[in-house]
Amino acid sequence: HPLQYLLHYHLASDASSIRHAPYILQHLSSRYFSPSPHVQKWTTRITSLLHSKNPGARWAAICIAYRTSVLSRSLLVECAPSWVGIILPLLSKSEPVPILKAAIRYIRLVLGAAADHAEFQRRLVIPAVLKVSAALASIVEQCKDLDTKTLATQTLGQLVIAYPSLHRGLSSRLFALCHSIFGGSAPRVTDTQLLNSTAALFASLHFLGGKVGGANIWRSSLEGVLRSSWSAWAALRTTFPSTSQPTQDAPAESSTTTALNLDKLRCGISAICALFRTPAQRPVQVPVGHLLALCWSLMTCSADEEGQSNIDMHARAAEAAAVPQMWMQGSLLLSCLAHTMRHLLAPHTSRLIMMVASQLEGNLEPSQRLAFLRCAYDLVHSCPIVGAQLGVTRLTKGAISCLSPLYLPGPQTREILETDPNQPKKHKKRRREYQGTDALSSSKILICATREDRDVILTALDVIGSALQNVELLPSVQSLSNRVLLSVLLSLPSIPPTSFSCDSSFHGRVTMRVLEICSKTVQGAPHAMSKITGLVLRSFPSEGDQQFQFDLLLHPRRPPFVRTLPCVESLSLYLAEESIEETSTRRSLGL
């Protein structure tokens, strides 16, 4: 029997159990636990290893018990009472980190498996949940290992959602635990995984109030982190004019540093986003005005504002350096609000889109531009837009400018193109021919060298694709967008994937995304895009089933127009036929 072999040759001693634990975990199978006398010997050996004085043997026993419980539900129900009684006290002792992690994972498995087993839940889970949660809270408060704290916080969040009524006695301790982490840390920022797990735990605490009090707890939690975020914002703008600062904010303490307040702001934004992502049992009241005011203050702050005359220049420089991070946090919050609130943002979308478009027109780093582009896509894609013609137009222009690496020539090509052919020969620059050393050169310039550059291109295409479906877009900008996309679509096959990006799949992803946008535009406007239908059809890849797209392009499922409508796209496909507005827009974008 396989279990007999493992018992005789791999679990014979503590040292052998530690040495062969990876092999055992890899080769265990559910068929090993069919009814057999060796199954009882297997569970007995695991129990004896759990009582071992060797920490390594205890770790191996917990891991094997976890794997056994995953593979056999009957053994989980049968052995969990005895194994949990041995493993649970380990959470309150100063055990090594691997033992704590393995113990947390095993207990989480046992408590999660009791959802559909009423007797098992009554006999084991209900008496043990409060003890487990208290031990996990102590681990989060005292343990120095970030991975262990993150795992304990994640487990706490899952247990609170699964057994909310059993955690009401720990509500104040859990709230204090979350707020202690949300207080930030400096100079080392709060770990991202720990912050996300803490935010998820904080967002689940409103379940402790039940159906009646849960909405009030959710609202009070949101107001608390919103006040904390406003306080952090005010502490980051002490050397700038504070005319837009809310009156309820308290002045920032002089002892707090810019890094600490920036991390506190990051924690507050994460908590707000987690609250909106977590479902509520009953409808809740959302302070839309206060949330959008925070987004506006974060995304419109600038380092060029005039401050007071007598200020600390070091504090001023530190706060000015924090402005890009404040933009990022504001974009993250606004994207979350656009995803979750949708129609509630309809009265404000025009102003928000204009603000994002004006920020995209500035000189931004790729990471900052990516944050604003994602925010713009979420607004255009998720929220209803009314009366935002100017904002959508400016936003589309900004997205087109982000595609400049695809349609503007590089430095060497531009140098050749800018050479006047009518200039005398002696004034012309000699064209640099290929040299043998170029084959050994490692300084090859890529169009999209970093991951952020690649994400900017893809997100800008998403923004343009969503904007083209919006009726608010000006016809001239719509025509220019179609021409730019068509130019990119026709030029991409001539660009080698190796010179496009270090990611070999990125070239194909961009091509398919541009092709998808062009095909949707052709399907949506059969008359306007009739001139480029053939070009789009020729751009489809030869492999794959494209019959559905071909049918939509050649035979659109819609009744014919009663009268012929004026179509800007069909008239301005060529450069000589473009309108004056389109010419000015094209020149402003450097096309």
Image (cartoon, rainbow, N blue to C red):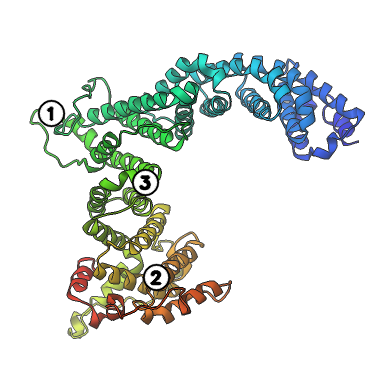
Quadrant holding the N terminus: top right
Nearer the observer, 209 or 298: 209
Q: Is residue 137 visible?
A: yes
Residue drawn 18% across the image and 33% down it: 316
Quarter-wise, where is residue 523 in the image? bottom left
Q: Looking at numbered disc 2 in the image, what kind of residue is underneath it?
A: Gly
Q: Looking at numbered disc 3 in the image, what kind of residue is underneath it?
A: Arg
Nearer the observer, 183 or 82: 82
What x and y, as percent, mark residue 225?
A: 35, 27
Whole-angstrom CA distance, mark 1 to mark 2, is: 58 Å
Whole-angstrom CA distance, mark 3 to mark 2, is: 25 Å
Whole-angstrom CA distance, mark 3 to mark 1, is: 42 Å
Residue occupying the far left of the picture: 309
| Callouts 3 and 2 close, C-beta under 8 Å | no
Nearer the observer, 83 or 287: 287
What x and y, as percent, mark residue 492?
A: 42, 72
Disc ID at residue 342: 3
| Secondary structure at numbered mark 3 | helix
In this figure, which residue is indicated by the disc labeled 2? 524
- The mark that comes first in sequence, 1 or 2, is 1
How many other residues sit within 10 Å of disc 2, few (<14), some (14-19) or many (≥20)?
A: some
Q: Looking at numbered disc 1 in the image, what kind of residue is underneath it?
A: Ile
* Number of marks in the rendered image: 3
- The mark that comes first in sequence, 3 or 2, is 3
Question: Can you tell which of label 3 and label 1 is closer to the viewer?
Answer: 3
Residue drawn 21% across the image and 85% down it: 425
In this figure, which residue is indicated by the disc labeled 1? 311
